[in-house]
Amino acid sequence: STPDSLAASHVVILATPGLYDDKDMKSFASSLGDMAGKVVIDATNPLGPFTDGLQVRTWEGGISSGEMLQLHLPKSKVYKAFNTVGVEHMREALGKDMLIAGDPDPSYRATAEAVVAAVGFKPFYVGPIRYSRNLEAMAELWIHMAIPGLGGRDTSRNFWFSIGGDP
């Protein structure tokens, strides 16, 4: 069962539709059960409706979905990753950079980075979970560029964000 699988896991990847509502976020976090000591990789984006283009929701004070999830799962270590690329890049990661934001604790961070590397991406830690604000904004930009008619230019979905130079 899902509850048994979550209880037995050390790492949980959330790849669900993003939550856009406080009540839904709290309910979802509660539905996960005891996540104490677990690495939670949040691949979601809190996307609003496509009525006038796409918007990522931020909470009061500019707080991101990743930060809200960490607030609701205080005994886990939440990392934002996998949210800035389309599904086609998940099939063929090919060593592309994957930006990660989350707890700086070396052992938990190493676990999150190992999962990202196991998928085939090159993990690039950008800072604490506060930086999920930036990753969610980048996801909004990626989506706007990837979906014809939404962005300032029409591109294919075959692009990704990468770190240049020697960081």
Image: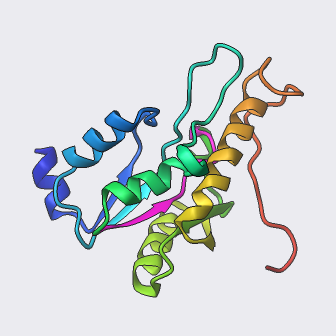
Please state the horizontal and vertical placement of residue 130, each as a whole percent of the image. Answer: 57, 63
Which residue corresponds to the image point at 26% horizontal and 39% vertical from the top-left? 27
Report if residue 161 lies within the magenta region.
Answer: no
Residue name at image x 13 percent, y 49 percent: 3
Of 139 and 120, which appears nearest the observer? 139
From the viewer's perspective, is residue 115 above or below residue 28? below
Question: Which of 126/13 is in front?
Answer: 126
In which quarter of the view is residue 40 placed? bottom left
Instruction: Decide if residue 121 is in sight here.
Output: no
x, y percentage for residue 124?
A: 64, 71
Q: Position of residue 87 (x, y in %)?
A: 56, 39
- Left or right: 4, with 28 as reference point: left
The foreground one among 73 and 163 is 73
Residue 9 left/right relative to 123: left
Which quadrant is the C terminus positioned in? bottom right
Total labels: the figure holds: 0
The residue under the point 46% across, 33% down is 20
Q: Quadrant of residue 51?
A: top right
Q: Residue furthest front?
A: 61
Q: Give the quadrant of residue 10.
A: bottom left
- 46 or 157, which lies in front? 46
Give above or below for 53 relative to 156. Answer: above
Q: Which residues are magenta?
A: 76-87
Q: Describe residue 113's horizontal placement relative to residue 123 as left or right.
A: left
Residue 138 visible at all? yes
Q: Residue at x 77, y 44 (%)?
A: 159
Residue 14: image x %, image y %?
38, 48
